[in-house]
Image (tube, helix red, strand yellow):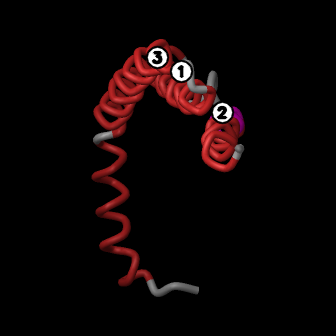
Amino acid sequence: MIPTEMLGPLRTLSDAAASMDFLTSAVVCIFALVLAVIGCMAYHRTKSRRLLLVNLAFFLFFIKYLIQILDMFLSPGFFFPDASQGVIELVAMLLIFVAIFRK
């Protein structure tokens, strides 16, 4: 068991992260959308299948965070559970993996 005095700094960090949850999600959502748009423009110019896969991954991250933000307001934590978020992240990471290692 971990002594409670060691958990103080971790609890402070966790509380600070929880208080910035909406801001962090909004920034990541916007950043993922910007990267998806840039990736879309690059794909239309090059027609590279790798760029298409990476672009789809960024779009999935955008969708994930958009749903997560909506979940904060509509039904806090009930509409978009962690398991669903994990599936979206797994698919996005698989798309990036295939884009990197496929010849």
N-terminal-most mark, 2 or 1: 1
**How far apart are labels 2 and 1 at the CA level?**
9 Å
Q: Of helix, strand and loop, which one carries label 3?
A: helix
**Three-letter amino acid code of the residue under disc 3:** Cys
Task: State the residue in front, 82 or 65.
Answer: 65
Circle 1 packing at 10 Å, graded few (<14), some (14-19), many (20+), is some
* Rendered position, 63 above or below 83: above
Give the residue displayed 44% in from the left and 15% down from the top.
45
N-terminal-most mark, 3 or 1: 3
Which residue is the site of mark 3? 40
Circle 3 packing at 10 Å, graded few (<14), some (14-19), many (20+), is some
| Span colored in magenta | 84-88
Q: Of helix, strand and loop, which one carries label 2?
A: helix
- Which is closer to the viewer, label 3 or label 1? 3
Which residue is the site of mark 2? 88
Q: Which mark is residue 63?
A: 1
**Three-letter amino acid code of the residue under disc 1:** Ile
| Left or right of 70 in this view: 50 | right
Task: State the residue in front, 25 or 95.
Answer: 95
| Left or right of 78 in this view: 13 | left
In x, y percent, where is residue 6?
Answer: 38, 83
Give the residue displayed 51% in from the left and 85% down from the top.
2
N-terminal-most mark, 2 or 3: 3
Circle 2 packing at 10 Å, graded few (<14), some (14-19), many (20+), is some
* Rendered position, 9 above or below 97: below
Q: Is residue 95 magenta?
A: no
